[in-house]
Image (spheres, rainbow, N blue to C red):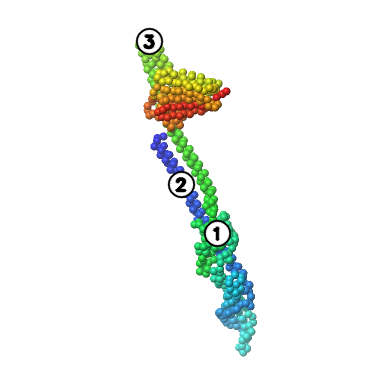
Amino acid sequence: MGKKLFVLLVVLMSLSLIGIIFVQSFFINNSLQNEEKNFVLSVKRSLSFVSKSIEDIEFRNFMVNVQPYLLKEENIDSTNLQNIILRTENDDKTIIHRNTVLEERFKVPSLFFEIDADSINFSRFKNERVTDVFSTGGLDEGTNLSPLYTLREFSNLSDLERNMWEKSYRSTFTNYPIYKRIKPEQVKILLKKFLKNEGIEIDFEFAIYDDDLATKVISDNFEMTEEARGVPIFLDNNNESSYTLWVEFPERKQFLLSTIMWMIVLSVIFTSVIIVAYSGAIYQLIKQRQISQIKSDFINNMTHEFKTPIATINLALDSIKNPKIIDDKDKVKRYLGMIRDENKRMHAQVENVLRISKLEKNELNISKERLKLHDLVEDAVTHVELIVEDRKGYIKLHLEASKSSILANETHFTNVIVNMLDNAIKYSDEAPKIDVYTENVGNNILLKVQDQGNGMSKQVQKRVFEKFYREHTGNVHNVKGHGLGLAYVKRIVDDHQGHISVESEKGKGSVFTINLPLIS
């Protein structure tokens, strides 16, 4: 995959993820706003019902106190306001209809309403309808003045009368103290009832304000905030009032969130799954790209490593075929030796690759026995000391550990030390200067290989034990290898229940440290 295509793919996937998160956030925020609007409407509707119920309760109580005096006819002073008479004659009968509107006035003691007055005057209107039927004899007999029968009906003009009573009640109580008209407990009960009917079952605080001043009808913890909602209460005959019933919900936000909590939880879960899948996909893409790059580097390095031996072998074979050389046994022997050495070199490289592969598949049989680490170090040094001497360098041993017995595989652990020494040699541009230290730390032994070579950056240190990884030097193959040595070292050390680490500074060399458990 090309770099541009890779970047484009990552950008598109990132934009898609951001878009999904944005849409989810917008949808949740929009749902929360809708719930907020529905909540406010429900609260206002409940407050309206409460306001109407409070007025109805007060009016009903007012009428309960007045009603007994309406039923006592001796206390009523009646006045005929309007009278309509209609006469009709039919054969031997004369029918007279009379429709009368009466005003009845009466007094009610003020003690029922705790008003500073002896009594309160009230009026009501009644409608009386009377039908008289007279018998008419012959012309010479005249008209009988006594009706055969009379029909009498009364009605209280209910709609008009109720309206008039309500106006009277409102006028009477307009300036009456609010705390005498309604108790806080009654307001709380009504609010709880109507809010529950709207599906709002959370704690609330309430108060009745006279303009901007709180009255005595108030709950203990009420605080006027911007989120409080109110409606007018105790309207006068002009549908105006200085009183407002306010309600405020301390747990309003939690309640609104709870209404869409299932949506939020599902959105978070699904978004998290998408993010995890996206992260995994990006990680795999980056990993695959790295692996592709590493494999490409590995193939280039292997090609370079095999190119020289193959060329050397071809040249040696061509030389042996030369008639002038074929009879010269010394030269033939020399060329055959070159072929054998180059063949061994390629074989060693192939074995290194196969060894790592078997280690990863746990197919490499590593038997362990009791060995002295110092003996393994001295043996490993013999493998590379000629190379060091040829480059005018040195390897100094500082084997100061008093205990060095470990459980290890002789062949593989010797290879580990040789690989570490070989790295120190290869990555020293000048004459290699290598120091090997051992020391006891508790029940462990530390093996340190220190060089004064090229060193490495922090970024390289993090990846130096990865398979196929080599520090990029462009197309210059000034250091032989294919990035398997230290990967093999780490795998063998891990198999021996040990730990390997590196400390390095660019231009000042490196220190590789192996920590292994001792055996008694």
**Which numbered disc, 2 or 1, marks the residue that appears first in the sequence?**
2
Asked whether the residues under the numbered discs 2 and 1 touch, taking CB atoms below 8 Å apart as contact, a structural biologist would say: no
- The circle drawn on residue 206 is 1
Q: Disc 2 designates what residue?
A: 22
Pick the residue in front: 180 or 474: 180
Three-letter amino acid code of the residue under disc 1: Phe
Structural crowding at the residue carrying mark 1, measured as other residues with C-alpha within 10 Å and reported as few (<14), some (14–19) or many (≥20): many
Residue at (48% x, 47% y) in the render: 24
- The circle drawn on residue 328 is 3
Residue at (51% x, 66% y) in the render: 241
**Which numbered disc, 3 or 1, marks the residue that appears first in the sequence?**
1
Looking at the picture, does residue 328 appear above or below residue 183?
Answer: above
Residue at (50% x, 69% y) in the render: 238
CA distance separating discs 2 and 3: 83 Å
Residue at (50% x, 62% y) in the render: 212
Three-letter amino acid code of the residue under disc 2: Phe
CA distance separating discs 3 and 1: 118 Å
Residue 351: percent from the left, percent from the top? 47, 22
**Which numbered disc, 2 or 3, marks the residue that appears first in the sequence?**
2
Three-letter amino acid code of the residue under disc 3: Asp
Q: How many marks?
A: 3
Residue 252 visible within the image? yes
